[in-house]
Image: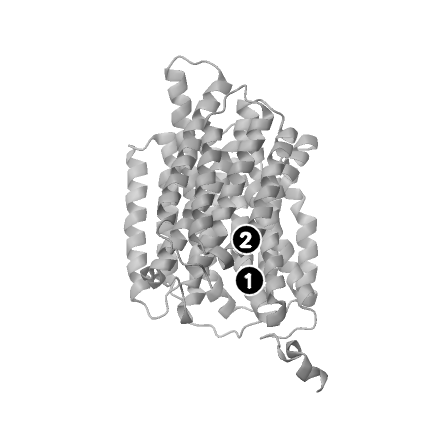
């Protein structure tokens, strides 16, 4: 028997063979790492930015919500964009776009310019993230696909885990502007890899563009996030806030109706008619809200509540970040052995414990306790995330399956932006309550406000626990 017959792997070819698939992926992997690193690294710099740029918490949170909002708007368009431009053109544009945004942010004279640069970076991340998975699926042979997807997943998990720590080190020795400057050499390296090794993996067909759906998506999601964000400053009863929220709901209802009645929608919302996907996607969104709200509040609590220097704050955040990456890497395997219901329920229950521990902190809480609470939360959140996501995506079959991942990724970013805005609003309400009750210490006010935000995280975890009971009890095959 010849070698080809004795080795079935030799018969398995990639859908789009390339000479060096790893080199082809490097530009996107580095770009994706920078994008995900950027999503968490700036959280630790927010107190410094508030002091230097003379802005409030309600204003500075736009650096987080605006970035995620742009990712959420661009993500569902990635499939359409790759049908109008080659893969290499899209990635090269995204890397240049991120570099331009980073330079604008690094040299910004004020908050407005900094936010503008930040949102430009969000466009790039929204283009790179989905293409990492798409290209890997095409250029690696089936027997190497598991390792390839694991590599992509590791980049997405590891970058946010080390973001606060590395940013804390940078802030300990330099200005916040260097958080953006350090992106540039990595983006240059990624650009060189993309120019020399990345090929097109799909035909350029230039289909018709549904500009109305794109506009409705931007206005709908944007209005919703703006309304929730403005509530921090103007209050939930403000006419501006209520008007923005009402506009967002109406426009998104129009957008949803249009997607459901089109032959080729941008987002195939018919996936939500499938119970397994509906529950799985809802759990993923709740879990992402837990992570984003807690990770937004915790670095600020450590600096403004415990009065710990920014460099040490990064070190305190490291154990939880590493645990997050480790648990994320192993939790997906649990689905194969026990299904989604058990790890999801246990994960959300652990999240409740971690959120409650954070809600019981004070201005005198020991550092070890904060680290422990963070680690507990970062065990629970990824433990629930991967099985829930796999359960939802495995519920889809046929052509509709390709839409599931895009919908999850899009709504994750939008829900993350809304959760951050809600946490900011609750932070302000808690601070006001502290002062109205006779308090006079800034640190005490911030801790009380952070408690309100952590209670929101606790409520999300409880809702996730209840919803996880709707998952199938059957063990995955």
Q: Which residue appears at 62% of the width and 37% of the height? A: 319
Q: Which residue appears at 68% of the width and 35% of the height? A: 169
Q: Split into 4 quadrants, where in the image is the N terminus?
A: bottom right
Q: Where is residue 134 in the image (x, y as percent from the top left)?
A: 54, 65
Can you identify the residue that label 2 sits on? 125
Task: Label 2: state its secondary structure.
Answer: helix
Numbered tag placed on residue 133 in the rendering: 1
Residue 219 visible in the displayed image = yes
Which numbered disc, 2 or 1, marks the residue closer to the eye? Answer: 1
Residue 53 visible in the displayed image = no
Label 2 neighbour load within 10 Å: few <14, some 14-19, many 20+: many
Q: Where is residue 400 in the image (x, y as percent from the top left)?
A: 40, 68
Q: Position of residue 203 (x, y in %)?
A: 53, 75
Question: Is 353 situated above or below 390?
Answer: above
Where, by quadrant of the figure, is residue 396 drawn?
Answer: bottom left
Q: Which residue appears at 29% of the width and 41% of the height? A: 243
Along the viewing direction, whichever of 345 and 171 lies nearer the viewer:
345
| Image marks 2 and 1: residues in contact by CB distance under 8 Å | no
């Amino acid at each position: 028997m010849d070698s080809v017959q004795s080795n079935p792997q030799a018969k398995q070819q990639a859908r789009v063979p390339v000479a060096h698939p790893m080199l082809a992926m490097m530009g996107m992997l580095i770009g994706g790492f920078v994008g995900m690193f950027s999503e968490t690294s700036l959280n630790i710099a927010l107190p410094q930015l508030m002091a230097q740029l003379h802005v409030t918490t309600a204003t500075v949170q736009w650096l987080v919500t605006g970035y995620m909002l742009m990712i959420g708007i661009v993500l569902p368009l990635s499939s359409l964009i790759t049908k109008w431009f080659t893969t290499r053109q899209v990635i090269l544009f995204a890397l240049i776009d991120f570099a331009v945004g980073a330079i604008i942010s690094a040299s910004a004279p004020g908050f407005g310019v900094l936010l503008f640069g930040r949102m430009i970076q969000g466009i790039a991340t929204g283009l790179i993230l989905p293409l990492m998975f798409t290209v890997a699926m095409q250029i690696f042979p089936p027997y190497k696909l598991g390792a390839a997807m694991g590599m992509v997943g590791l980049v997405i998990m590891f970058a946010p885990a080390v973001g606060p720590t590395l940013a804390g080190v940078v802030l300990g020795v330099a200005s916040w502007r260097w958080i953006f400057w350090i992106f540039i050499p990595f983006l240059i390296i990624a650009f060189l890899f993309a120019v020399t090794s990345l090929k097109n993996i799909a035909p350029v067909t230039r289909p018709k563009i549904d500009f109305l759906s794109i506009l409705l998506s931007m206005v709908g999601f944007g209005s919703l996030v703006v309304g929730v964000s403005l509530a921090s400053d103007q209050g939930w009863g403000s006419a501006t806030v209520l008007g923005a929220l009402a506009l967002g709901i109406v426009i998104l209802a129009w957008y949803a109706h249009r997607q459901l009645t089109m032959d080729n929608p941008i987002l195939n919302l018919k996936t939500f008619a499938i119970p397994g996907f509906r529950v799985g996607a809802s759990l993923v969104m709740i879990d992402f809200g837990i992570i984003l709200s807690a990770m937004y509040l915790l670095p600020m609590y450590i600096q403004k509540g415990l009065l710990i220097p920014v460099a040490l704050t990064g070190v305190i955040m490291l154990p939880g970040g590493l645990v997050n990456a480790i648990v994320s890497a192993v939790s997906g395997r649990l689905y194969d052995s026990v299904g989604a219901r058990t790890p999801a329920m246990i994960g959300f229950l652990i999240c409740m414990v971690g959120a409650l521990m954070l809600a019981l902190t004070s201005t005198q809480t020991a550092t070890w306790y904060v680290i422990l609470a963070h680690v507990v939360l970062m065990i629970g959140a990824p433990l629930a995330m991967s099985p829930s996501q796999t359960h939802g995506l495995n519920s889809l079959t046929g052509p509709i399956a390709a839409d599931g991942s895009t919908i999850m990724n899009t709504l994750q970013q939008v829900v993350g932006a809304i959760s951050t805005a809600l946490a900011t609003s609750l932070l302000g309400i808690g601070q006001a309550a502290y002062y109205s009750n006779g308090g006079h210490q800034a640190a005490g006010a911030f801790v009380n406000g952070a408690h309100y935000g952590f209670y929101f995280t606790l409520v999300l975890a409880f809702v996730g626990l209840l919803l996880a009971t709707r998952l199938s009890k059957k063990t995955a095959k």
